[in-house]
Image (cartoon, rainbow, N blue to C red):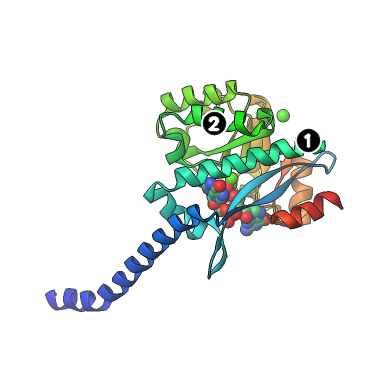
Amino acid sequence: EPRQDDANYVLYAPALREQEDRLITLENELHQAMKENQFLLYFQPQQRLCDGAMIGAEALLRWQHPTRGVLSPNEFIHLAERTGLIVSIGEWVLTEACIQARQWQEQGHDMLISVNLSARQMQQADFVERVTTILARTGAPPHKVELELTESLLMTDLDRGHDMLCQLKALGLKLAIDDFGTGYSSLAYLKRLPMDTLKIDRRFVSSLPGDKQDGAIVRAILDLAEHLDLNVVAEGVETQAQHDWLKRAGCDVLQGYWYSRPLACSDWVRMVES
Ligand code: C2E
Ligand code: CA
Ligand code: CA
Ligand code: CA
């Protein structure tokens, strides 16, 4: 048996070290990226189902890496969270999103922009003050900016979370629960927290309309939202059949490849002006 351990060690140690090296490189590059402005936002349009209008967009972070092309959050957000870099990245994201909201308002587009928040950002003691400053500096209309929080983020410290959300609401911001249905939350908190929107996670949408169980779950969420007076956004809608099903079921808004992929700024301008 010790021999087996030795064998494992010989097999895995170099691979581990390589992985470790890659992480350290990535971490250094991430610091560099912040300094050199290598981040950008893509915007994924959202469609209102009753009339087909585009009513908003989610801001999605991208990293224009110097050699590896445009990277998705899955490739670096974890590390950004672990190193705490997500705090300054998140502040940049919120600022850019607010600038965009202000611009849309000036151009006469009635559009909501949604921004993802990370736990580390919310844990800052002065988070509400920081948001207040960003709103003031950018002149963004607060009621056109929605903050997306995950259930696990909400559940980590419910009392503090509750106070903070009430303060953010008082600023005029909108609040959404992201990836709804995937967390460990109880339904009681839905009543307690000042939310505006539920975003149904794509895993419940992807097998619609064929899957009876997912259909039942989505209907239950829509019913719950109706009675709690919350808006519902279905995420990850990829097909006409999913669109039709959701529209018939009374879902308010959809987001997904069927309507549009996340767009880089130049594509966005082309779409809005066409
Ligand atoms: P999310 O908040 O659930 O965002 C939706 C993700 O689903 C996006 O991935 C989007 O590109 C993808 N998506 C949209 N429509 C479809 C579809 O029809 N089919 C499929 N298969 N996927 C679709 P993306 O942009 O790679 O972002 C991944 C995650 O990274 C986000 O998930 C969010 O949790 C996180 N993230 C993105 N931007 C930020 C940010 O600025 N700050 C923080 N903290 N997290 C972010
Ligand atoms: Ca989101
Ligand atoms: Ca989501
Ligand atoms: Ca409603």
Question: Dot 1, how many residues are within 10 Å of its Cα: few (below 14), some (14-19), or many (20+)?
Answer: few
**Residue at the right extreme of this rendering:** 274
User: Is 257 on the left-hand or right-hand side of 129?
Assistant: right
Return the residue nearer the eye: 131 or 196.
131
Q: Is residue 91 above or below residue 135?
A: below
Q: Secondary structure at mark 2?
A: helix
Question: Dot 2, how many residues are within 10 Å of its Cα: few (below 14), some (14-19), or many (20+)?
Answer: some
What's the residue at 69%, 29% (across, down)?
141
* Image location of residue 51, percent across then percent down: 85, 40
* Image location of residue 157, percent across then percent down: 40, 30
What's the residue at 78%, 35% (across, down)?
106
Return the residue nearer the eye: 9 or 79.
79
Residue holding disc 1: 106
Q: Secondary structure at mark 1?
A: helix
Residue holding disc 2: 131
In the rendered structure, which amino acid carries the disc numbered 2?
Val
What's the residue at 66%, 39% (across, down)?
99
